[in-house]
Amino acid sequence: MTGTALLWFRADLRLHDNPALVAAASADELLPVYVFDPRQFGTAEYGGRNSFEFRKTGDRRVRFLRESVADLRSSLRARGSDLRIEQGAAPAVLRRLVEEHDVDRLHYNALPAPEERDRGRAVVDAVEDLGVDPRWAWGHTLYHPEDLPTRVDDIDDTYTPFRKKVEANASVRDPLDVPDVPPLPAEKERGSDQGKLPPPAALDAAPAEYDDRGALAFEGGERAGLDRLQAYVWERDLLREYKQTRNGLVGPDYSSKFSPWLATGCLSPRRIHEAVEAYERERVANDSTYWLVFELLWRDFFQFQVLKHGGRFFSPDGIREREDIDWRRDEAAFERWAEGRTGVPFVDAAMRELAATGYVSNRARQNAGSFLANDCRIDWRWGAAHFETELVDYDPCSNYGNWAYVAGVGNDSRDRAFDVVAQARRYDPEAAYVTRWCPELAGLPPELAHAPWTASTAERERAGVELGVDYPRPMVDVDAGEGN
């Protein structure tokens, strides 16, 4: 008799390759649970002097999360189980359920970021006196921490040496099969009293509609994530040119766009790796197939960096302890950036796309982030917090890791500032992306659409663009990086 187990789902909303589920499946009875914890929603505040509030989870991520939880429930029901859905503080909710069902074991997948680690410890502490055996597993990264060449605390703080050591001395574990799911606790019948999916309003969100200008209509859930993997790799054969197209800006196919499903745990990185290896055997192995795994390893790098450094990663000076930067906290300038009114079209296009769809390409993210942090010198964490609100693929480690990186306080000693106009002209030569999101500039030729302040009065008049009326004047001198 192995008793009753409770499986607490977190950012692992899948049945495939789920180590905590596999471990919990040895129980006689299993209660799968997802908790909508109010601390993940509503507003939060960066403390200290000049603090500001931001929403933890925006409308589009709430939609994606609700779809993912609903899909997980459907998959469990198809296997004779169900998903208990609760609202409330996770420690209190899980303690109550442990008591109600006389649970012997609590299973969950651990996560690397400080808030998530604290929440895991709080749950374990809440049931400590009930005689429950807490068992955590690890399923959030491509490589398991135990398989790294060094302890997490000793990994390199620069990506290239980390990558080289991992590639030479570690291997990716095979993804785990979906186990047989034990029945629910005997006193509960499938589908009875398992809780309802909360409406968006209960999660401080509004219904989010899809904008057809967006890159992809991201649908939450394991099935949608596996469908995207199948379509991208096999049906549309897009993997073979991934390295050449990954810096694109418009459309569904320039990159894999697996990140929303990875962030929510609907798609396992090891499942992606398995697909890449199969593709290399059956079709082609080239720079593009390598590069997709290269990017998954970048994701791992940030997960392990946050696990190593903890809260230091979220400080204004970062892990490099840069005391030479005087970060500004100018709310008016920040709002112009967030609303896509900087007067720099490439940046504005990125921020408008983010607001309308919850997704932005990596190239556009880097440029929008560099503009705020390096040209405006506004506290990079404000930008990271805004992305936390808006991104459908928000992951704390990747988001804050990339922001710290581009702001010069993270995992690179080099100056990461971008020349955003030069970048725009290189990656959007026909201004198709800029005019998609800044249609008021469509009458200008591409070269001028990227820098309308350089157009002559006659050129702007012909295009129907009056700076300061139809489109903002630049809020900084982009070349000098100084405010006007």
Image (cartoon, rainbow, N blue to C red):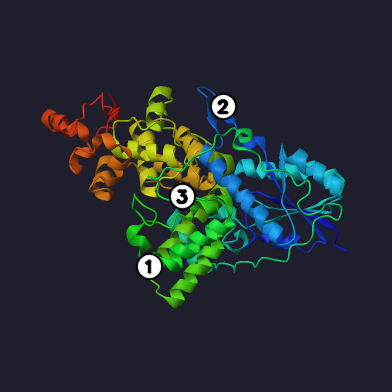
| Tag 2 residue | 47
Given residues 478 and 271, the one toward you in this image is 271
Given residues 200 and 160, the one toward you in this image is 200
- Mark 3 vs mark 2: give the one in front: 3
| Residue drawn 37% across the image and 28% down it | 336
Mark 3: which secondary structure? loop
Amino acid residing under circle 3? Ala
Crowding at mark 1 (Cα within 10 Å: few <14, some 14-19, many 20+) = some
Taking 322 as reference, is 108 left or right? right
> Can residue 395 be seen from the camera position used here?
yes
Crowding at mark 3 (Cα within 10 Å: few <14, some 14-19, many 20+) = some
> Can residue 20 be seen from the camera position used here?
no
Real-space Cα separation, disc 1 to disc 3, in angstroms = 23 Å
Of labels 1 and 3, earlier in sequence is 3
Taking 105 as reference, is 240 left or right? left
Mark 1: which secondary structure? helix
Q: Which mark is residue 217?
A: 3
Crowding at mark 2 (Cα within 10 Å: few <14, some 14-19, many 20+) = few
Rendering coords of residue 359 (x, y %): 44, 45
- Mark 1 vs mark 3: give the one in front: 3
208 versus 170 height, above or below: above
Image quadrant assignment for residue 105: bottom right
Taking 53 as reference, is 338 left or right? left
Q: Are marks 1 and 3 in contact (CB under 8 Å)?
A: no
Of labels 3 and 2, earlier in sequence is 2
| Tag 1 residue | 240
Amino acid residing under circle 2? Gly
Real-space Cα separation, disc 3 to disc 2, in angstroms = 35 Å
